[in-house]
Amino acid sequence: MAKSSSLNVRVVEGRALPAKDVSGSSDPYCIVKVDDEVVARTATVWRSLSPFWGEEYTIHLPLDFHHLAFYVLDEDTVGHDDVIGKISLSREAIAADPRGIDSWINLSRVDPDAEVQGEIYLDVQMLEDTRGRCLRCHVLQARCGQRGPQQSQDGILPTWDLAPRDITGTSDPFARVFWGSQSLETSTIKKTRFPHWNEVLELREMPGAPAPLRVELWDWDMVEFPPRVLQQNAPRGWFRLLPFPRAEEDSGGTLGALRLKVRLIEDRVLPSRYYQPLTELLMASVLGPAEEDAASPLAVLEELTLGDCRQDLATKLVKLFLGQGLAGPFLDYLTRREVARTTDPNTLFRSNSLASKAMEQFMKLVGMPYLHEVLKPVIHRVFEEKKYMELDPCKMDLGRSRRISFKGAPSEEHVRDASLGLLTGYLGPIVDAIVGSVGRCPPAMRLAFKQLHQCVKERFPQAEHEDVKYLAISGFLFLRFFAPAILTPKLFDLRDQHADPQTSRSLLLLAKAVQSIGNLGQQLGQGKELWMAPLHPFLLQSISRVRHFLDQLVDVDGEEEAGGPARALVAPSVIVREGYLLKRKEEPASLTTRFAFKKRYFWLSGEALSYSKSPEWQMRSSIPVSHIRAVERVDEGAFQLPHVMQVLTQDAAGVLHTTYLQCKNVNELNQWLSALRKASAPNPDKLASCHPGAFRSSRWTCCLQAERSAAGCSRTHSAVTLGDWSDPLDPDAEIQMVYRQLLLGRDQLRMKFQEDPNIDSSPEADAEKGSGATEGVCPDALARHREAAARLLEVLEDLDRAHEEFQQREQQRAALSPLGH
């Protein structure tokens, strides 16, 4: 059973930040760190003291992480970036509420000397002889990421050694061990950032109360062990260095605040066979008869899910059905339920229902390359040309209108006319690109829209509702896909940076225009934005073209389904990922040290995974992508190293080979896993299983089998990444989340569908109540509802027992295994 721990982090916005530039503003960005490892960096918001980022990250974590920190910095083109402040959240604070943290939090001041420095490797023993007790502390080595919120050369990743403390760019570290009133020091290692002492320090116990052990690293920080830990579980392994105790200065809001959303998700994922009954129930829901839609297990699950959890549930279900090749039937099922419940066509898909959220996530999963192809050229022009455009008289800045070429003195009319020309100059290519993109739209999206079009047409066949079948599709494609991407290109990976204030306003005007086109002009001339009227003629001309485009879009045959047969997801000659990794080949040696990994620069295309000593090195080696049979994570215990993956290849003779690659952090590991799996998606003869460990000391570290050729002990994830989604699909993890959602609603499930005294679907009750049972609800539907609830409860009980059994086994193994590692 695999354990997983991840943080869902959204850096929403900031407010009241201090001005750091002479202009009276700042150019803020955020760095996210987990236990002093930089895992994410937002883009910079230019010239703003109330920046909006809206950037979201899923950070896969080690189970024993301690704290999460957010640093806000002001980007400077000359010199070092200024640190504005930070927010530090402990693991305990994040885990206190299962719903997570969603609030404004004041920034605190940053003292660079108080930042955590890294880790030290210790092996501590308590010994006794005729003279009493002796503490033996073996100080081996130390390591650390960067100090404070600095950046590495590539922008966000920490270095793999100690941060410099001296003007020379290095440090002169030594360790000092305190036990009671005694202390000893290691030797000083000159001018190094990765010291190796390998020294044993022995201290005798003095009379008095038991004393804690404290290890200090100079010029750095410290780690401390209480007496109970020393007596029960002698420490051995890597331990985090903590800053010396000092009171954190509270800024009292003078440094501003951040609005953050943080949720910790910790779970144990069972082997696939335990989830099969729940998976089959959900799959049967979308493949069953239409009359049972309202009484299926999936319908029951939707009724139990609150609005706050609906987004997560939609994402997991879309991934789950994509992996099963049933995304089309799943979306059709939700669409039919939503349309059947809607009486007013003007409200169709306007709520945040499961159907709306699922279609939104589906478009992002399978349609991002399509979105980029359609919008990227024009978005790039808007950013590069930086034209001033404004139609709202209340927002016009006539002083900036000098940038617009016109004759005569600046006036609102001149600015409006020039802006209108610029806006239509951008909107024209956008509309042309959209209406000409029928052949480039992914077949899976076209099939989903075709099902939606047909369902709405059957539900609202009246002539006065002729446009509803178009609005249903354009409401998703224009209002929830194209328009949001135009408004915030950074959030859709169309740009690396957020727009400056002027460009952001231009994008807002373009997004409003695209929304109006997507609404087929139904709201033109209404509301408060009458200043958009100069654009109306252009918008009205575009609407007939959009209708024709939508007719073509749904005119599609075939049953191609995303998640079905593997297809090439990476162009052969395009470099989709590159960067430094540590590499090690599989070798017959029985022992492997960390130094067997060599630093190499890698390039990945659809043809090969190539590498050399540096980006400039002419001699390159390569692994053909067509030879890849699996790409999997490697247990940390295999090499005593984190963030390692393995690429399993098969040569012409049918012999399997393994290449081990270590990444800088866990997010980079996931990105390389996803990219390699995409590149190798069409390959035949994928491996069904592999070893998550390494063959060392004549046995596999994972399953302890003594034969190198022994069958793998863990399943692979050969085809679990689709489209441009950066997070690899994992069916077991997706269905585990569905199980957790059902657990939250189990009491409601029992009360609503089994213990309600007003619901009695027995034959005698049905005969007594007749066709008007339970306020007009069909007795057969009630019976099916209760049957679905009963099946879900039965599956939940089976999964409960499986989790309890695995937890007991883990506790037994932990009791028998050596402590302190």
Image (spheres, rainbow, N blue to C red):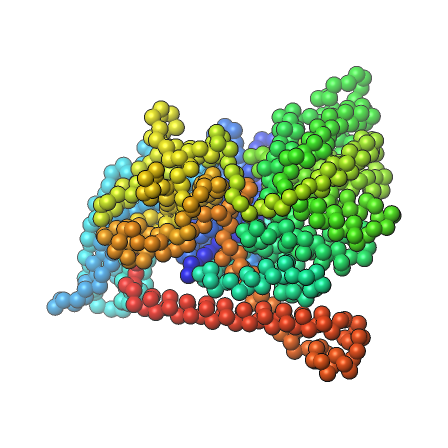
Q: Is residue 117 left or right of residue 568?
A: left
- Residue under the image location 84 percent in, 48 percent down: 465
What percent of the width, then of the height, locates residue 336?
Answer: 72, 56
Image quarter hosting the C terminus: bottom left
Query: In this orientation, which residue lies closer to the viewer: 328 or 227?
Result: 328
Image quarter of residue 622 = top left
455 relative to 613, above or below: below
Image quarter hosting the N terminus: bottom left
Query: In this orientation, which residue lies closer to the viewer: 775 or 96?
Result: 775
Image quarter of residue 745 = bottom right
400 relative to 747, above or below: above
Q: Return the residue found at the far right.
A: 464
- Residue under the image location 27 percent in, 51 percent down: 708
Query: In this orientation, which residue lies closer to the viewer: 747 or 657?
Result: 657
- Residue under the image location 26 percent in, 43 percent down: 587
588 relative to 128, above or below: above
Q: Return the residue found at the far top.
A: 407
What percent of the width, then of the height, locates residue 698?
Answer: 23, 52
What percent of the width, then of the height, locates residue 644?
Answer: 37, 46
Q: Return the residue found at the far left.
A: 130
What percent of the width, then of the height, locates residue 27?
Answer: 57, 35
Q: Is residue 650 left or right of residue 441?
A: left
The answer to whether residue 223 is visible is no
